[in-house]
Image (spheres, rainbow, N blue to C red):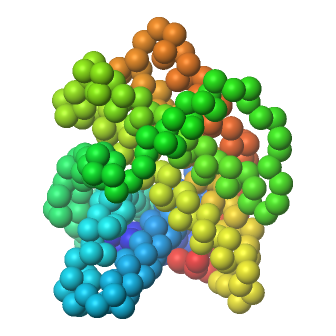
């Protein structure tokens, strides 16, 4: 529902940006408006990618359970339980994408966007509830991390082994090999995001096991980790979708447009993950230990710089030419 609303609002904003003239030209020709249109599209595309991915994962799980002799109800329940974390990610990310889009849509519409006579105001008002019902976004963020640790404690998920591997990698010399192949930098960025999350969450868990930290009382740290989860899942979902689109000839847009959305999202996600990891680690580590962790953050956030201005203009151009959502 949230992503559908976001796409509708992108449509609305694009049409108005094409129609509204200022200084003798459509406001959509201005860089500041193109930034807004492109960013709305990128976030909506990321949310849609994560949604399709999770839907398929749940469908596959349900089919496997049914094939194993489970009833329809049991199969549905198993699928929901298996992907509870992903569903929380979708709820939070989707509702916050929509909130971003409706806010920028009002801004693009200017004064009339604030008037109840126009649909921009209604979308702005209606969107706000989505961050509250179905579990507030704050609760869903805490649930993501709680579910992860519970599964690890039950032996359903191994995070200790991978976290230890990251620790050993930090003690070794960094590799200067350049990734090769299609989307090699993007694949490495995703792998590095996972390492940062393992390093940060693993360090927090170790502190708790040593009696130096009570994560139940550290909601700020858990929120930092949850936000890293969200960026990772959205980015990886986008990468998988863009890779699949690369093999399709009759897609709505040229591949360079989809590549641009992926690259801009990864560029920005790298900055967000860097901040969230730094904030979390500085909340419970200090001295030489903190310095080691921060070196790890720096090592695992090396996605190359992207000319986001030109990429966003490319995306906005596709929207303006199609006069609406076109991906």
Residue 104 x/y as whole percent: 42, 56
Q: Position of residue 321 (x, y in %)?
A: 66, 77
Can you see residue 272? Answer: no
In this view, 30 is above or below 217: below
Front one among 159 and 14: 159
Image: 326 above or below 198: below
Is residue 249 something that shows in the picture?
A: yes
Q: Quadrant of the N terminus?
A: bottom left
Location of residue 89 (image quadrant): bottom left
Q: Work out which quarter of the rendered image holds the C terminus and state it.
A: bottom right
Vertical side of 154 occupied by 10: above or below: below
Q: Is residue 120 left or right of residue 326?
A: left
- Total marks shown come to 0
**Residue name at image x 55 percent, y 23 percent:** 294
From the viewer's side, name the closer residue of 187 and 31: 187
* Quarter of the image where one finds residue 320: bottom right
Q: Quadrant of residue 107?
A: bottom left
Q: Is residue 198 left or right of residue 59?
A: right
Name the residue located 39 percent from the left edge and 84 percent from the top edge: 64
Q: Position of residue 40 (x, y in %)?
A: 49, 61
Judging depth in this view, the residue of 134 and 126 nearest the camera is 134
Q: Residue at x 35, y 73 (%)?
A: 5
Q: Position of residue 220 (x, y in %)?
A: 29, 32
Direction top: furthest residue? 287
- Residue drawn at the location 31% of the way across and 75% of the way down: 79
Instruction: Using residue 271 as the reference point, say whether residue 69 is left or right of it.
Output: left
């Amino acid at each position: 529902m949230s992503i559908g609303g976001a796409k509708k609002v992108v449509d609305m904003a694009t049409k108005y940006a094409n129609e509204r003239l200022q200084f003798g030209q459509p406001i959509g020709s201005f860089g500041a408006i193109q930034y807004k249109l492109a960013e709305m599209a990128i976030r909506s595309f990321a949310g849609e990618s994560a949604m399709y991915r999770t839907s398929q994962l749940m469908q596959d799980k349900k089919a496997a359970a049914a094939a194993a002799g489970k009833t329809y109800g049991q199969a549905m329940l198993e699928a929901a339980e298996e992907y509870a974390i992903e569903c929380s990610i979708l709820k939070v990310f989707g509702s916050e994408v929509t909130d971003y889009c409706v806010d920028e849509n009002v801004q693009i519409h200017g004064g009339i966007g604030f008037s109840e006579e126009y649909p921009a105001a209604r979308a702005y008002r209606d969107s706000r509830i989505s961050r509250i019902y179905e579990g507030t976004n704050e609760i869903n963020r805490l649930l993501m991390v709680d579910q992860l640790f519970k599964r690890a404690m039950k032996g359903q998920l191994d995070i200790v082994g991978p976290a230890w591997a990251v620790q050993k990698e930090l003690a070794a010399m960094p590799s200067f090999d350049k990734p090769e192949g299609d989307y090699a930098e993007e694949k490495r960025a995703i792998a590095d995001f996972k390492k940062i999350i393992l390093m940060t969450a693993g360090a927090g868990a170790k502190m708790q096991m040593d009696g130096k930290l009570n994560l139940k009382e550290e909601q700020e740290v858990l929120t930092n980790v949850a936000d890293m989860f969200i960026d990772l899942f959205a980015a990886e979902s986008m990468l998988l979708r863009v890779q699949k689109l690369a093999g399709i000839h009759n897609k709505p847009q040229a591949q360079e447009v989809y590549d641009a959305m992926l690259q801009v999202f990864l560029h920005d996600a790298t900055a967000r993950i860097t901040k969230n990891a730094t904030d979390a680690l500085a909340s419970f580590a200090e001295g030489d230990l903190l310095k080691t962790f921060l070196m790890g953050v720096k090592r695992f956030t090396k996605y190359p710089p992207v000319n986001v201005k030109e990429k966003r203009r490319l995306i906005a151009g596709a929207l303006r030419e199609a006069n609406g959502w076109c991906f």
